[in-house]
Image: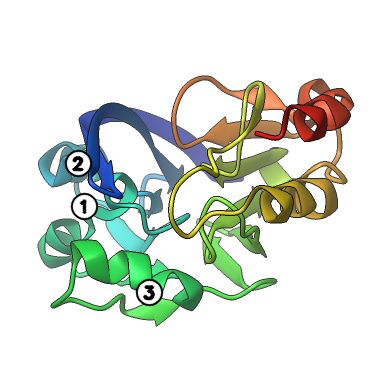
Amino acid sequence: MAARIEHLITSGTFSLDGGTWQVDNNVWLVGDDAETIVIDAAHDADAIADAIGSRKLAAIVCTHAHNDHIDAAPVLARKTGAPILAHPDDMPLWELTHPDREPDGALADGQRLTVAGTDLVVLHTPGHTPGGVCLHVPELDTVFTGDTLFRGGPGATGRSFSDFPTIITSIRERLLPLPPQTVILTGHGESTTVGTEAPHLQEWIAAGH
């Protein structure tokens, strides 16, 4: 039996470039009754630990290193013994939030993370951040996009460490070629599908954001 997907929403703040904003984040768990992976340990380590329960936490995977996606990761790692995995290109952002605690392992394009007999394939999708990644789960017809692609368009690229042409390239080359029925589970807000978003690429390019 394939792994299942569970969902929490946690609330806190996102801070960068001197500004701070209230945000709700999606936290995703992929696994079964014995083990699971957490994608983006946002804001509330206790709530995430409660959702994990007695299961083994195999890894805490960071889609990118903005503080609102990683702020609870070290505490959750201490509670569970799970390693924190992040792409090394996001270390400058990681260090803004956790200067005294490095991730335990590096994510790389094409890497496969296996939980409950199900593979999550790492796709390096820079643009929102240099080390942004998505996680494609072919067996579940799902891709976890963090803040790379949302319902209605790309993630924001107006702040430090981000670049609009780069995120467009990532979306065009890494996400939109996935099967159209692939469900997009995002870092904030509602889900969508590749088939729903793909026809709008040129609109996003024309808009420039």
Label whose residue precedes the other's in the sequence (3 or 1): 1
On residue 91, the disc is: 3
In percent of width and height, residue 115 lies at: 50, 59
Q: Which of marks 1 and 2 is nearer the N terminus?
A: 2
| Label 3 or label 2, whichever comes before in sequence order | 2
Q: Residue 155 carries which label?
A: none
Regarding mark 2 in the picture, which secondary structure is present there? loop
Q: Do the residues labelled 1 and 2 touch (CB within 8 Å)?
A: yes
Mark 3 and mark 2: Cα distance apart in space: 19 Å
**Quarter of the figure with the C terminus:** top right
Left or right relative to 144: residue 23: left
Up/down of 118 relative to 90, above or below: above
Which residue is labeled 1 in the image? 71
- Residue ID at (65%, 43%): 143
Q: Mark number for residue 43?
A: 2
**Place of residue 11 in the rendered image (x, y in percent of width and height, measured from the top left):** 22, 29
**Residue visible at 29% across and 48% down in the picture:** 16
Task: Name the foreground residue: 13 vs 196.
Answer: 13
* CB under 8 Å between discs 3 and 1: no
Residue 71 vs residue 53, the one in the foreground: 71
